[in-house]
Image: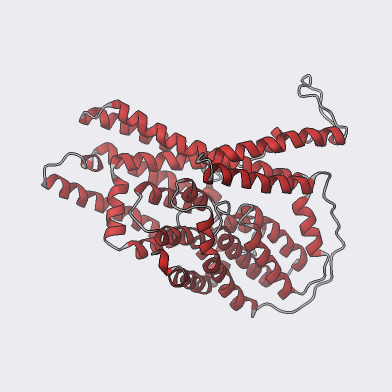
Amino acid sequence: MKIFSFFCMALLGSAVQSFAAGHGGGETAVSLTSTAFGYASLALFVLAYILVIFEERTHLRKSKPVMMAAGFIWILLALTYRQVGIPAEQAHEAILHNITEYAELMLFLLAAMTYINSMDERNVFQALRSWLVSRGFSLRVVFWITGLLSFLISPIADNLTTALLMGAVVMAVAKENKKFIALACINIVVGANAGGAFSPFGDITTLMVWQKGQATFGQFFYLFFPSLINWVIPASIMSMFVSREVPPPLDEKVVMKFGARRIILLFFLTIVTAVSFHNFLELPPAAGMMLGLSYLGFFSYYIKRVEKRSHEYDRPLGISIEAHDDPFDIFKRVARAEWDTLLFFYGVILCVGGLSQFGYLAMVSHQMYVGLGATYANVLVGILSAIVDNIPVMFAVLTMDPAMPLGQWLLVTLTAGVGGSLLSIGSAAGVALMGTARGTYTFGAHLKWMPVVALGYAASIYAHIFINSRLF
């Protein structure tokens, strides 16, 4: 929190410096950073994000403050444009540009979330969990398996789903062994975040970089070995503190429902469709994902026919559907999407877009990427993402659009993805596990091992610079 406050104060301070420098030459192009409405917009964003940080204490959903801040920031921007004589059409075009960016991201994520929810309904993840807890592995083997699966599953599913699945396995196997559960949860968080960093589908930040065209689909896999190093080094050190105790296997068996394997296949086909739209047709990946969602829509109809469930779309009010007659309806899976998260993205994108129009991002870009240099700036982005959510940080970098070679864009993708592992609050995976393993996996438990996680963070950066030196 102190670092976040310092960052915001530095931003305000640099705004004053930028304004003074700009007015020395008589220019009015940068004067928006010094207007009262500009400062008010910056304060609104900081206030909204403080509420986001304290979501666990206030129980105020994170989407609400950023959506409100976004609306007021654009009101203040429009009023500022009117005051300084900038045509209103420019604000209109700017907000449409940001809404278009959000629409692409939202539709992509909506399709992916619907597939994940469908696999969950068909017991795909539950079957994997039951298989693991019934094997009778030692605690050290469970530690490595859950970490490895977190690294391998998160490039396809999101890191939140992966962390919750593996966390459930750990808590089912270890039960009252709090020390092991805490270490295993740290390992899962690091593995899930590292795995998501080398795939366009693994994290929101990598998806944004891919959709912006800063790296092609295949170029993200240059980050595979640096990401692997980011997980393996902390895991190797922490595993030495895990006992070889073999807990009794649990007698748990879950069978996947009809169509589960075909839904997994359709999800992979949807990914291929999205990549093909982007690489071969030069169309937005989101359009490919929505086409892939239609695959699931037709297959859901087939499931209902085979299972002989109800095909009625509308029923009179007051008449409920019995559990055994509840159809596999794709729209129920859509309704289960993380709408709080999707609306949070809307607020973040419009907040950052509005501050960009005021000129703050261009100023920060100069301070970071010219003053510090691209490498140090990108490393700093990763550290900030451990304190501030990596989504607004990465969107801000993409909006700044500093002139960088591919190696630097991959570096900031890596750091923004794995930097959240430094603290338990730095990623959705960490926050989710703190909720499910309440009192065992805590902020303090993760902080104790932060030097080990930081060692992996530094090693992954050096590995990327060394292995992919030709990209810089």
Q: Is residue 239 above or below residue 40?
A: below
Where is residue 332 drawn, in percent x and y? 71, 35
Where is residue 124 drawn, in percent x and y? 76, 51
Q: Is residue 98 above or below residue 220?
A: above
User: Residue, x 42% and y 37% (percent of image)?
Assistant: 98
Q: Quadrant of the N terminus?
A: bottom left
User: Residue, x 71% and y 34% (percent of image)?
Assistant: 297
Here the colouring is: secondary structure
Q: Is residue 78 above or below residue 173?
A: above
The image quarter containing residue 461 is bottom left
- The answer to whether residue 340 is visible is no
**Is residue 91 rendered to the left or right of residue 202?**
left
Where is residue 37 drawn, in percent x and y? 28, 36
The image quarter containing residue 153 is bottom right
User: Residue, x 77% and y 53% (percent of image)?
Assistant: 126
Taking depth in this image into account, of 266 and 51 the one nearest to the observer is 266
Q: Quadrant of the C terminus?
A: bottom left
> Which residue is at the far top?
316
Where is residue 183 drawn, in percent x and y? 63, 70
- The answer to whether residue 92 is visible is yes
The image quarter containing residue 241 is bottom right
> Which residue is at the far front?
280
